[in-house]
Amino acid sequence: MEFFATTSAPARQRTECAIVGVYDKGVLSDAAAEIDARSGGRLAKLVKKGDLRGKTGDVVTLADLDGGPCERIIAIGLGAKSAFNRKQYRRALNSALTAIGKTNAREAVSYLALDGAKDADTYTLARIAAEVAGNSAYRIPDHKTANKRPKSRLAKFGVAATRSDRSSVERGIEHGRGISAGMSLMRDLANQPGNVCTPSYLANAAKTLSREYRSIKTRVLNEADCRKLKMGSFLSVTEGTEEPARLIVLEYYGAERSKAPVVLVGKGVTFDTGGISLKPPPAMDEMKFDMSGAASVLGTFKAIAELELAINLVGVVPACENMPGSRATKPGDIVKSMSGQTIEVLNTDAEGRLILCDAITYARRFKPDTLIDIATLTGACVMALGSHYCGLFSNDDALSEALQEAGNRSDDRAWPLPLGEEYAEGLKSNFADMANVAGREGGAITAACFLAKFTEGLKWAHLDVAGTAYQSGANKSSTGRPVPLLVDYLINR
């Protein structure tokens, strides 16, 4: 989709579709009033009849206009003007784009940001607009042979701005476009079934990024390479499947090479049966989403390459399947990690931490300034936070605060949870340096405590996105999170 900023007066801007706001009690926004005056006063008539009250969620589409610069008007109820905020703004844009999707319009201009919102500047409102518009055009990869989902017709989307705000609006549009592109890649990968999106498929997707962007370099290590590196913990997870594991390494250097990079480590379990500790059948199909951490790393790389950010970034993705089989790791088996520490595998369904710990150790060779791992790691995090916040753990208060602020700015929120020796006590083993699970209580925290045993000397954070990376039910699909959080954090570095 093509995005642009316009400073033309609403009454003069030619467009196939103008998106305008109407506040509570039918008060037209300035842009709505100006366009309405040129279009026969249709909105004012609807207000007078009581058919357009400006309540939050109200949507009216006018397509049979008499004159004026626009072919259609989408009027969106914004609620009380004094209470209008970014959350309502995002909701209004989503409603408008849904309405546009029911028309043949290929181009639209939004005037919703002109009156502002009480908790967002013009840059933020423009970024949200581009992100929402880009996401509205996204379609799940379609394997249907009939009744295929129609593609979005909308090809061009504008954001109205004042002359003084134009530069900040253009910057916001550019960043929103990049975030949307990264989210779309993540969703494309995560929405594919497990028999399509295998570890090799993920590796090829990373190689495709390198072909699309000269700034990204990709290397793929096979199982023999990982064995030479003594990644016994990672390889223990893939013992039960014939699908070969891959360690994917991406590098992006937008700043001087001497500057230490940020390293993103993404869990890439392309299908998780639980292994010998087999999961119950209901909703097991959703375990194709267990590579969402990996997909978010690739999506973030696409976004920063699109934006050409002046930052150094490395991605490390351990990709594998977790399947039962005659050679699969059994509960009670002991494996040796790349760090040299031994692990008693008490539950083979706690496999994400087993692949991440070796990837974290491997990432040390890049001498990172900061290391962030992203994983759909625990159902316990879903029980604790639901689907609104991802879990945030860190050994560095400043990093935790920066990620929390990035989540708030991007509406992709994270909630800090504790790390502590008390929680790690349950990981003690009579037979190895540690066990891979503790008790049921505080499961998201004990999982993070396990990873923390491999992060000494690193400035590290862990994002548990098990509740936020995808949604279940009738709208089952990837959400594209936490790409917005990660990209915002990198932009603000």
Image (cartoon, rainbow, N blue to C red):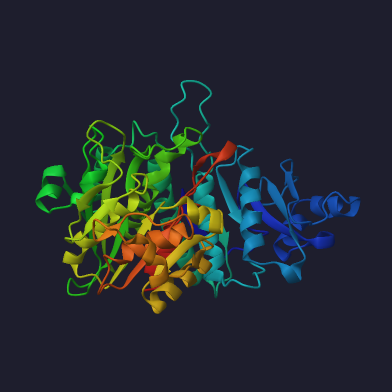
In the rendering, at what x and y percent does residue 115 appear? Answer: 67, 68
- x, y (%) of residue 159? 56, 60
**Between 398 and 178, the one nearer to me in the picture:** 398
**Does residue 493 lie above or below 317 as drawn?**
below
- In the picture shown, does residue 151 fall above or below 492? above
Describe residue 428's horizontal placement relative to residue 221 as left or right: right
Judge from the rendering whether residue 449 lies leftward or rightward of residue 40; answer left or right.
Answer: left
Q: In which quadrant of the rendered view does residue 435 lie?
A: bottom left
Seen in the image, is 454 located left or right of residue 171?
Answer: left
- The quarter of the displayed image where residue 22 is located: bottom right
Residue at position x 81%, y 61% in the image:
24
Q: How many marks?
A: 0
Q: Residue at the bottom extreme? A: 398
Front residue of 74 and 345: 345
Looking at the image, the residue that sits furthest to the front is 430
Question: Where residue 242 sits in the image (x, y, percent)?
Answer: 23, 32
Q: Is residue 162 visible?
A: yes
Q: Residue furthest right?
A: 49
Where residue 283 appears, x then y in whole percent? 50, 36
Res 211 seen here: no
The C terminus: image quadrant: bottom left
User: In percent of the image, x 13 and y 53: which residue is there?
Assistant: 230
From the viewer's side, name the closer residue of 91 and 356.
Answer: 356
Residue at the outermost left position: 228
